[in-house]
Image: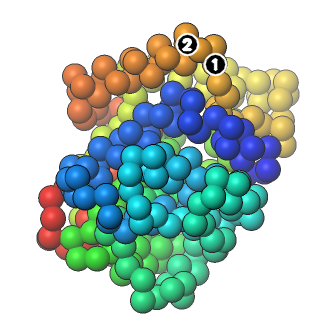
């Protein structure tokens, strides 16, 4: 992503409904697996500008580490005072090979890797997880949602559950839970993406100046969207469709997923 996209992410991660939902989902997965233990070692791989790490720190987690391939993203993390290092994620195998983690989070990271590179990354992740360790990953879902946002952030692919059912086991990982979200907002998101596609086809906007969906709506609308998704999560813990796919997996058989 370009520095403008990182700057938007840095400003909005703590307020935008989508980020708030995602951060809460990650925290819920950690609590389900580790209970009240806040001293577990957590790595946020591809941590962006550090919004999730900042959120987890406020939740009381004490052993947090982040890695990202972008110097811009790492600079924003350092503004937050976070322990984040710059690393080409393809080089994870060689980075501090003796360090292992109880949980690794990879949110919207896998979309930058083709299958061979992703297979290598997943194997490296499995080796960095302690036995029974947790893998948490949010991902772009379903190609029908592909639009200007993907172009703006450089995303090259979208996923369905079957992709992870195929890719995780050879790396020594298993899926515990997977769900798409948000079903209720899917018609609105699809309509917006179709409008974006029309803009590109008509030449009203070019790929070079494509813009992401990272912007803060009016406070009442931001809160309404947040509440809609929270109600959906309560009524429908798993849904069959949505623009994002949240996956919780683990290494080996230990622990509860």
Q: Is residue 246 left or right of residue 29?
A: right
> SS for tag 2?
helix
Instruction: Give the camera-side residue of 245 and 97.
Output: 97
Disc tally is 2
- Would you name the residue on which mark 1 appears? 217
Name which residue lies at 31% across and 20% down. 231
Using the rendered view, name the quadrant where residue 22 is placed: top left
Q: Which mark is residue 221?
A: 2
Image coordinates of residue 28 in percent, x first then y, are 29, 44
Q: Quadrant of residue 89?
A: bottom right
Left or right: where 177 falls relative to 182: left
Tell me if residue 138 can be seen. no
Task: Tell me the quadrant of the picture where the C terminus can be found.
Answer: bottom left
Please provide percent x and percent y for residue 149.
Answer: 66, 37
Tell me, yes or no, if residue 76 can be seen here: yes
Q: Residue drawn 66% across and 42% down?
A: 9
In the rendered image, residue 234, in percent from the top left (x then y), is placed at: 24, 25
| Residue 140 drawn above or below residue 218 | below
Question: Is disc 1 placed on a helix, strand or loop?
Answer: loop
Say which mark, if any, is on residue 162. none
């Amino acid at each position: 992503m370009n520095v403008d996209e990182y700057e938007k992410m840095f400003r909005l991660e703590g307020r935008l409904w989508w980020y708030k939902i995602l951060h809460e989902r990650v925290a819920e997965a950690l609590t389900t697996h580790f209970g009240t233990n806040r001293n577990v070692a957590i790595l946020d791989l591809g941590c962006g500008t550090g919004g999730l790490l900042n959120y987890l720190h406020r939740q009381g987690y004490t052993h947090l580490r982040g890695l990202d391939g972008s110097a811009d993203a790492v600079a924003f993390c350092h503004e937050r005072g976070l322990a984040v290092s710059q690393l080409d994620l393809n080089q994870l195998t060689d980075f501090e090979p003796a360090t292992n983690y109880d949980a690794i989070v990879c949110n919207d990271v896998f979309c930058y890797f083709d299958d061979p590179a992703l297979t290598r990354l997943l194997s490296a992740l499995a080796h960095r997880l302690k036995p029974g360790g947790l893998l948490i990953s949010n991902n772009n879902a379903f190609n029908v949602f592909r639009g200007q946002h993907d172009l703006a952030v450089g995303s090259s692919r979208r996923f369905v559950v079957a992709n992870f059912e195929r890719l995780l086991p050879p790396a020594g990982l298993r899926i515990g839970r997977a769900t798409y979200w948000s079903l209720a907002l899917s018609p609105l998101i699809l309509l917006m993406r179709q409008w974006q596609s029309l803009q590109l086809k008509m030449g009203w906007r070019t790929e070079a100046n494509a813009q992401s969906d990272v912007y803060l709506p009016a406070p009442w609308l931001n809160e309404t969207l947040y509440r809609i998704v929270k109600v959906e999560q309560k009524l429908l813990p798993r849904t069959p469709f949505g623009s994002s796919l949240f996956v919780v997996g683990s290494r080996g058989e230990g622990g509860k997923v």
